Every structure is written in structure tokens, then in C-alpha cells.
Amino acid sequence: MKWITVRRRHPRAGYAVMLLALFGLGAGYMALMPDSTGGAEAVSSRVPLQDIREGKQLYSQSCSTCHGQNGEGTDVAPSLIGVGAAAVDLQVSTGRMPAMNPDAPQQPRKRRVFNQEETEQIAAYVQSLGGGPPIPSGSDIAYEGADVALGGNLFRANCAQCHNFAGSGGALTGGKEAPDLHDATPTQIYEAMITGPGAMPVFGGDTLSAEEKLAVIKFIVDVREEPNPGGFGLGRFGPVTEGLAGWLIGIGLLIAAALWMTAKKQHD
Amino acid sequence: MTPRTSPTRRLIGGTGTYIDERFGSANFVTRSLRKLFPDHWAFLLGEIALYSFVVLLLTGTFLSFFFEPSAEHVTYNGSYENLQGVEMSAAYASTLHISFDVRGGLLMRQIHHWSAIIFIAGIMVHMLRVFFTGAFRKPRELNWVIGVTMFILAFANGFIGYGLPDDLLSGIGLKITQGMAIGIPVVGTYVSFFLFGGEFPGTLLIPRFYILHVLLIPGILLALITAHVVIMWYQKHGNFARKRSTEKTVVGAPFYPYFVAKTGSFFMFVFGVTALMGALVQINPIWLYGPYNPAQITADSQSDFYFGFLEGAVRLMPAWEYSALGHTLTLSIVIPALVIPGLLFTVLLLYPFIEQWVTGDKRHHQLLDRPRNAPTRTGFGMAGVVFYGVLWAAAGNDLFATTFDIPLFATTWFFRIALFVGPVIAFVVAKRVCLGLQRRDRELLEHGVESGIIKRLPSGEFIEVTETPSEEAQAHLEGKKEIPQIALPARDDGGVPAPHSRGVRAKLRAALNRLYTRDEIEVVPAEHHRGEHGEAEHRELSSTE
């Protein structure tokens, strides 16, 4: 052990010890860390490095002004470290990101800027920054066989208070709103549930199991595709639009009829 | 009877004689058939309400054949896929059954709901017509009271009907009702327990509501409608001032055949419009709301339009709540849910008597006011309309927010301010508009109708030729009656007011009367200006004034 004794007073010994300690800490952490970022590793191992590089390029061009050079966030926009690929896919595929007006309380759904390949590249890059929920794949969102009655009950218990009973959307405080679900794809609905965009809470596995999430998706898709058996649906906004129609069409037509009948009378 | 009379005529004549010999009704029928009804489009507005009530009774009877007023738990296994196997009340299941499995059931439900909305909207427009034309004045004050009572009953029955299907929206409405009941100071919890027969929601409410909805309230309404129409028949319909019509004579077309034809076809219109809406426009899609579950709520849970003002009042009210002596006073419920509707309906009920007290006008009125000729009343009415309208609009503030991208709280504050400022602006503007229109009427009477012909006189002066309004128009324009003024408190030489004008009430009355009769514009009958040939030449306005 003499060589240690000799070298421990070496000017660079401190650095060497520090390096070793850091290495040990890192190795220990890797070995003992719970497998919560398993998805992240799965994606980063699945995604070719090339995609991450392309994604970084796109990120630097279109996202970094607000979200920071390395996704660390700025005063304008939040950090993206740990939000996961699912959040990126949701925000970019609905056209909400890149934002036109970052100061708005909430970004509206609009025409998407990046196609699916580019979106996935950006998602891969953000995923590489700190993990998070991955983009759900085909088998995750196979909702066709789900229980729609269960989904309806869960939707009314968890979603309808903001998104309305038929997914027509609703107002929130602070200038925000719960968007309508007319155009949301099953993937986007799933991503919204696991990432909790904006004012929406995260519906983790403890709140809604994977099966229950699929039931909710099934209900949303079924209801919006279901025709209105009673005629024109008035946007499925409830009694407000019904009252408007009652006055404008009902009373409007009847007053017109009254005017017409008495006008006829005056000619003879 | 001559041998040439046809068998049909013999049959009718025979039956008529038979009835007349027993009831002596021929005289009554003959007189009734000849009864005159004045003709104006606004006089048909009440019939919107009358006939949609008939539609309500017919469709409601159909619905009652299939509706099961029970909170009993059942598992749904009807044709609507999305609710298969879901536990729900029998009331909700039977409403789904009506909507999807009874032939014509959905159509009947939708006609029923649309005619309910048109019923109450019809009452509103009719009531506004009666208000703004002063048709509630003596001798019709009591008929106005009957009308407002029916208005309140219609509100109540509409609300109860909204609660019957036991879908999520109904249940939320009932929950809010329970909140209002429980918010009544001191006795709130007792009222709530009495109403629901225990804890909310319980199982008693639906059968209770059902019997109120299909028996008690429609029965009272039917009786009051009869009284309303018979009184109108007896007192005769009011009329606008026109040629030959006076406070003693009615000008119009006889009941038979003109009015019968008109009112009969108007019934067809009402039935047609409600059926058309029931067939083409979806209303209250209860299957989308799902069964009521006290743990659930949905965005856009609003009341039907007529209760919007209560909903809006609750939305605008700040969250004020105080506790004292073991009792909680929830002002955020008491004011919007009890004070505001109480105030609104009390003023409505008492308005004829209030106005009579202020104006001292106890004359018998057969001729109606044109709204412009009673500027203060019109202004007050418009203030009321705006007050109600702001509260009503506030009930939809979330839809305003999402539709027009306005922050929700901004709409709340806008409506809060508008609730107080709006009626004042409406009063001033409506009154000024009325006065302006009166001045124009007076100008027409004084100077005639502009003919568009400019003449140059030999002296070089230009004048515009004006024509005298037709006799009918003149009678209409001259129909304005001056509003009596109450003399200011008389004072004797020492400046002491007369005993009858000393009290607070007398002073208030004099002050209100001054407010009511201020800015009177005198009507000058056209005779003073008319030339011999029914055409007059006048100088331009600017040169005469």
C-alpha cells in the first residue's frame, strides 16, 4: 500500500478521489435506482441516436427560444426535462406547439407544424433529456374492445366537469378552457391522460388503470361518432343553446306568423 | 221548418233548439259569435302560450303512458348501447325507453320539451305586450295578477319537469335546489328534509315531483287559464286608438267567422312550429348525460332558459357567508336564490297597483297605450328587461368565455357591473327614445307627412308640401292620454302642508308621481292645422320654429 501513501499527497490526488467517488455514486445509483424510467430507457435504446440528433436540431430551431437550449425552461415556458415523449407528441401533434403566442393563457389546437416523423424525433430528443412517459404504441391504445358503459361512467366522474358530458369542451378560470374532444385522436387522449397538459390533472395508473383509460377513449370516440337521433344537435352544449333556439326559431317563427296573419287581414 | 230544408240543417237546427229549450243558450251563443275582437299582431302573442299549453297537455299525456316515476334501482338493457348494463333509476330507464324503444316517443318528448320552452317564452312576450301597452290598468288589474300567478306556476312546473327524467342534468338541478332550500336561514335544513323526505337525493322526490307535474300544477293552470280567458272575454279585449274606437266601443272583426278562423290557424302554426322543432332540433339528449350520480357533474350544466336568471344570479354573487348564534347565513345563496326572484315576482304582481297609486289613475281603460306614450313605464319596463336579461346572460358566461375567447372572470365582472348600470342606462335610453318618438308624432300631426314635393312661391320662397295623415293614422297618433299629475303638497299661508300630504307615504307618492309625469309632451290634435281640402301647405320646420 506504499504507492497509495506516496501518491496521496500528489497535487492531483484530490481530483482522482473525487472522480472515483463520483463514479462509485453513479454506479450505485444505476444499480439501485427503481425502474421508474424503464420506459425512457426502452425508448432511448429503441430510438436510434440519429433520431435524437435530428430531434435536437429541430428542437434548437423551433423550441429552444422559449424552452431553453437544453430544455431547462425559461421565464416564458416550462422546463421539458422529464415531461416525456408523450407530452411532446401530444403538444406538437395537436399543433399547440410551437406556440404562436406564448403569452396566451393557453395554446389553441391548430394545424400541426411538424409531421409525425419530425414530431417523434423531437419527442425522442426530449425523452433523452430526462425520461418521462413514452408515446403509447399501437397495443397501448387498442380501445375497440373496451367497455363503453364503464367508460361513460368514468368519463362523467372524471372528465365531464370540464370537458362537458359529450366532450364539447368548457370554460376554466384564468382565461383557460378545457378543449372540445371532437378532433382528439385516441393516442392524443391517452397522452393527455398520462401527461396532464395545462390545467388537466395526470390520470396515473392508480386513478385510471390502463383498461379504464381505454374505456374512456372508447366512450369519447363512440359518443362523438354517434348521430343525434333527435335532429340537429345544437353543438351538444346543453340548455343554453336550446334556449337560444327556442327563442330564435320557435318564438321567431310564431311572431312572424302573427305578423303575417294580421298583415293579410288589413288588405281587405 | 220548410220541407225544403236539408237533413243536415234540420239536424243542427233540431239540436240547437233542444239545447236552447233546456239551457236558454241561443241568446248567449248568438251574442258570443258576434263578439268583436280587435286585430293586431301583438294580440296573438298570448295565444302562443295558450296553444303551446294545449300541445303540452297532449304530449304530456302520451309521455305519462310510458314514464315510470320511481327511483327504484334497475339495470338498463334497452337499445342504447352506451348504457347497457348500467345501474340507474326506473325513471331514467323509462325515459330512455321512451326515447329509443317507444314508437314516436323521442318525437313526443322533444315536442313536449320545445313546447314547454315556447310556452314560457310565449308567456313572457305576452306579458311584455300587456305591460308596455298598459293593458293591466283598470279594469284588468286582477287578470294581470292571474297572469303573473300562471307565469310563476309555469316556471315551477317547467323546473319540476326538468327534474323528472333523473338524468345527470336533472340531478344537478335538484342538487342546486337542495342547496337553495338548505340556504334558507334557520329553517333551511327542515325545508330540505321535508322536500326530499330525508337526505338528498332519497327516493321520494321523483314520485312527489311527478304528481305535482302532471296533476296539481296543470290542474291549477287549467283553471286559471279558463278564468284568464273568461275575464278577458267579459271585460273585452283592449285596443289601440283608431278611427271610431273609443273607451266605450271596440272596433274589430266578429268572433265568428273571422276570429275563429284566425285563432284556429294560429293554433295550427303553434302546433306546427313545435312539431317542426321537435322533429328537427334535438333537445335534452338525456342519454348523453347518463344517469344521475351525486358524485358526478358536467360542464354546461345549466337550467332551461327561464331559470337562467337564477343561475346567473348565483354565478355573479360573491361568496359571502356569515355565522352567528349557531346559524349560518349564506348570503351567496340567499340573495340570488331567494331575494332576487322574490323581488322580481313581487314587483311584477303588484305593478298595476303601484302604478295606479303613483298616477292616481283610476279611470276605466279600453284603449291601450302605445309604449312611447307612457315613457316612464316603458323605461321602467326596459330596465326590468335588462336586469332580467343580464342575469339570464350571466347563466351562460362559460359559453361566452369559450365561444368568444374571453376570460371567464372578465365575463363575471362585466355582468356584475352591467347588472347595476344596465337597467339605469336602459331606463334613460328607452325614455328618451319614447319622448323622441312622441315629438315625431306631434310633428306629424302639426305639419303633416312630408310629400317630397318642393314648391317655389312667386316671392321666391321655397316650401315643402305636406300631406295630412290619413284619418286612421290621425286617430292612432292622437290616442295619447295625458298622465294625471298629483298636485304638490298644498301649503297654507304659513307654509304648513295640508294634513293628507304630510306623511312619508304621501311625499314618496308625490315624488314618484313627479318622476312619472316629468317630460310630458302635450298632444295637439291635428284639426287645428288641417286645411279645408285635407291638404295643407306648411313652411319648413326651421322657418316656423
Image: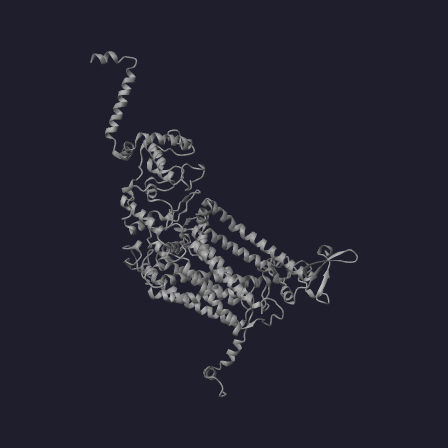
Q: Is residue B421 visible?
A: yes
**To which quarter of the image does residue B460 belong?**
bottom right
The figure's colour scheme reads one colour
Residue farthest to the right, as pictured: B459
Q: Is residue A129 visible?
A: no
Query: In the rendered image of this protein, does residue A93 appear above or below residue B431?
Result: above
Count all numbered tags in the image, as a single digit.
0
Image location of residue B49, percent across then percent down:
47, 64
A245 relative position to B540: left or right:
left
Residue farthest to the bottom, as pictured: B3
Residue beneath the point at 51% across and 59% down: B347
Q: Which is nearer the eye, A170 or B100?
A: B100
Query: In the rendered image of this protein, does residue B46 appear above or below residue B179?
Result: below
**To which quarter of the image does residue A198 belong?**
top left
Which quarter of the rendered picture does the C terminus of chain B lie within?
bottom right
Image location of residue B344, percent across then percent down:
49, 58
Image location of residue A157, percent across then percent down:
33, 49
Residue beneath the point at 59% across and 65% down: B361
A151 relative position to B123: left or right:
left
B174 relative position to B372: left or right:
left
Query: In the rendered image of this protein, does residue A32 appear above or below residue B335?
Result: above
Residue beneath the point at 50% across and 78% down: B29
Query: In the rendered image of this protein, does residue B500 appear above or below residue B29?
Result: above
Q: Which is nearer the eye, A122 or B118?
A: A122
